[in-house]
Amino acid sequence: MNPVSSSPLFKQAALVAGEWLARSASGATFQVCDPFDGKTIATLPDLGLEETSRAIDAAARVQPEWAKRTAKERAGVLKRWFDLVIANADDLATILTAEQGKPLGEAKSEIISNAAYLEWFAEEAKRIEGEIIPGAHPSQRILVLKQPIGVCAAITPWNFPNGMITRKVGPALAAGCTVVLKPSELTPLSALALAALAEEAGVPKCAFSVITTTDAKSFGLEVTKNPTVAKITFTGSTPVGRWLMREGADTIKRFSLELGGNAPFIVFDDADLDAASDGALVSKFRNAGQTCVCANRIYVQQGVVEAFTEKLLSRVSTLKLGRGTEAGVTMGPLIDGRAVAKMEAHLADATAKGAKILSGGRRSSLGPTLFEPTVLSGVTQDMIVTREETFAPLAPIIAFRDEADVIAMANASEFGLAAYFYARDMRRIFNVAEALQSGMVGVNNGALANEMAPFGGIKQSGLGREGSHHGIEGYLELKYVALGGL
Ligand code: ADP
């Protein structure tokens, strides 16, 4: 038997308004495929408007009761969910690798590091604190209450099918909100497995629904137009984020948006080049380059370009491409043929304009979605790779002269999610960290996300923060009470 389908967490049904639905009202279904070989892993109901609006209504019905529970009770449920995710991490990782392709070890680390958001927000539930402000008159006091925003719609992508859910649903439930989630149609099985564990942990029926659908646009239209939905929390591409904001304007939706990036990764001439190449390897090639905080453009100061490139190449040569479940594999397939075509287009544009391929540069013989990790030298600012997110294992190296030169190039982007740089000089560290236009800066650090830090972007990379004590604020409204007659 296929080991994925033997897991009790492998669900071929959606969770809608407290019921596991194996069939949609329309009878339509869709298939979930392994990106490594395209083989079908599961068949799911392709849900539509009827199920989405039922889930929203049910979420609205149970929300006041969930919000009325004590913070400690909500925290207890989230803590149990966290414990169950950790206890089932191996099964969850098998499901994740089957539908997304990343190596099993990386899948497990996604699950464990993102379960931490459930644990963190379980604790934060108990720290939703208001304020008492002196009044405008002696007989008045101003009370500031923090209350749950209400029903939230969450839309998540395929690159972190598990992690993108805990960092949205965790704070929402902690705050006393309820959630209707639409995971990517490419990776819905991880969402359903998490929902099964949420149910077991005691998340109330209807407080968390998972809509499986291939009709993302209809879901988007329903959640933006339906006045019962108070907030949309979305991780995905900038064009879809813009569209959701436009559509949600009529009902003044609240938004948390985690959109595209185009992260610069800068190596100064005083950097520890071994640490910088270790960082570049993680930042560029984790998840086969399919993360929104991936190093997209690697800027290296003229005097150290050769030495850094050599070190990076030697680390890239240790990567092992293959099926995520095979021992020793460190890089899996790209998600689909479109992702491969985008990588090839960026590569062709760069080489046509004079870039040189130092390693990789072609598809692997192992399968149509596997691309060899690629390093390019001689890259210039007129090439597409410096402007658009490649979302693939392509590391373009661009030489720069000095601080002012590289800051100007790094900031020449409509995006502002993550930036990285390696340096030792303290003056430089402060100046550059302050000058880079991005929501997150890794200094001598190639990995940024953890539950204690406020993850998010500026410019057209998004709105709001996920993680840290700031992460729960997006699920709360302030209410001011003018208490008179005192
Ligand atoms: P990616 O290029 O990473 O797939 P998308 O923004 O297309 O990024 O997808 C991210 C998530 O947004 C997925 O769950 C996808 O189904 C969903 N999505 C795409 N288009 C829409 C839309 N018009 N309305 C709502 N969700 C959408």
Image (cartoon, rainbow, N blue to C red):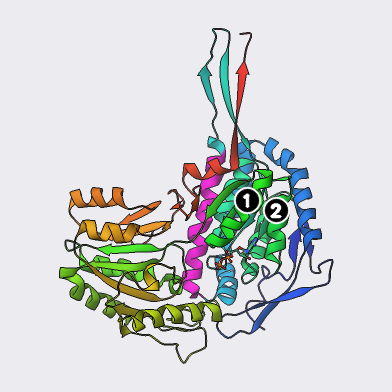
Q: Nearer the viewer, residue 295 or 280?
A: 295
The residue carrying mark 2 has its beta carbon less than 8 Å from ligand 1 = yes
Please say whether residue 419 is visible from this viewpoint.
yes
Q: Is residue 124 magenta?
A: yes
Which SS type dominates the magenta stretch?
helix
Instruction: Tell me the residue at 45%/80% (across/down).
Output: 345
| Mark pair 2, 1: CA separation | 8 Å
> Horizontal and vertical percent for residue 126?
56, 37
> Horizontal and vertical percent for residue 158?
57, 68
Q: Label 2 belongs to which residue?
A: 223
Q: Amino acid at mark 1?
A: Ile
Tell whether label 1 touches label 2 (CB within 8 Å).
Answer: yes
Q: Secondary structure at mark 2?
A: helix
Q: Nearer the viewer, residue 178 or 106?
A: 178
Q: Is residue 148 magenta?
A: no
- The image quadrant where one finds the C terminus is top right
> Horizontal and vertical percent for residue 475?
59, 43
> Horizontal and vertical percent for residue 441?
35, 54
Instruction: Tell me the residue at 22%/78% (across/down).
Output: 310
Instruction: Point out the stretch of residues depicted in magenta.
Output: 102-125
Q: Is residue 461 shown left or right of residue 75?
A: left
